[in-house]
Image (cartoon, rainbow, N blue to C red):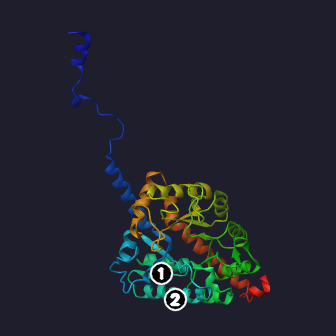
Amino acid sequence: MTDLQDEVHDLPEADELPVPLTAPYVPEAEAETDHLGRAHALLAAHPVADGYSGLPRALRHLPWHDLQLGERGVDTDVPRLRKGHVGALFCSLHLPEGLAADRAVGATLEQLDLARSVIATHPEGLRPARTAGQVLDARNCGRVAVVLGPAPAAALDDSLAILRVLHSLGLRVLTLAGTSWASEAGLTRFGEEVLREMNRLGVLADLSGASDATIGRVLALSRTPVLCTRSAARALCPHPDNLPDVLLARLGAAKGLCMVPLTAEQTGPDVRDVADHLDHVRAVAGPDCVGLSGTYDSGAAHPQDLADASGYPHLVAELLRRGWTDTDLALLTWGNAQRVLRTADFTARAAQERREASRANIAELDG
């Protein structure tokens, strides 16, 4: 027998080999279960404030619904909201495309009335909320806080009085786009007065879909942090509602909030694509500037594993895999939206002590 054969025969058996000092091998399935378990635990403490839901429009097409038991005709119902750990839901009052301009106010009021009716008929799962304190109270009672808005700027019919009436009925967010006073050219003098009155009332400005000129002027003028209720990173996807890095940086500096939509069109077909956008927004604008927008029941297609409101734990699990800290995740899901609402409440109370309701009109300001 050769020396080499002697060495082979002298090798220890496999069960005699020393145990390595490195961490034990964890099967991929077990690792995934661990991340998903951590996601559920984190969301139980810091639920999702979902920045955009098209539920009111979707329910108009159903002859009958029961969101408490579960509703097959929509993406959103109470069981799926609870499974996804959604603690607050911003209900969009946006109008169908092609609606006549003279129908905007009435159609918005109809959607607002429907949303209020849905909340009232599901008291075990939903609760109306206008302030940050009411949102927190609803969560502490095990209910989903429903915040009304965004509504389209066309719903004002160029009237600050209508803005005040809508606010008295619960409107909390208004999208500044699609009107003569908030256009591709930016805000007119009347548009600036609308924004000042919104700050006085506590109505948040939504800049998703607004022109870059309007976004820039609102960021310079608003005393209250603004929202982009459905905007991702234009650097990753050139969708017109997504924001370029220069505006993301300005939004972060202004302590605003970019709520990344869970849509295949704006972010991509996979959970990892959505996570890429969240990574990018956090890197450019900061962890205080990023939030989530399910955009469910809006007619949009959604990424795999995020088909309805129950899918949020899968997204949080992906972010945990990428090394997001619990602190940054708590800001993403809940903390940032609460901060913006709380700041708007404080600013409105202070402004109402200094400033009377504006009686300006578009004719005298814009000619």
The structure residue drawn at horizontal position 47% and vertical position 87%, both measured from the top left corner, is 114
Q: Which amino acid does label 2 sit on?
A: Glu
Side of 127 where 361 appears, left or right: right
| Closer-to-camera residue (141/160) | 160
Q: Which mark is residue 57?
A: 1
Question: Within 10 Å of the Cα at label 1, are there few (<14), some (14-19), or many (20+) other Cα atoms?
Answer: many
Percent x, y for residue 125?
A: 39, 80
Q: Residue 166 carries which label?
A: none
Under tag 1, what secondary structure? helix
Quadrant position of residue 304: bottom left
The structure residue drawn at horizontal position 46% and vertical position 78%, both measured from the top left corner, is 55
Question: Within 10 Å of the Cα at label 2, are there few (<14), some (14-19), or many (20+) other Cα atoms?
Answer: some
Q: How many labels does the image show?
A: 2
Q: Residue 110 carries which label?
A: 2
Percent x, y for residue 101?
A: 62, 85
Q: Is there a contact, CB below 8 Å, between mark 2 and mark 1?
A: no
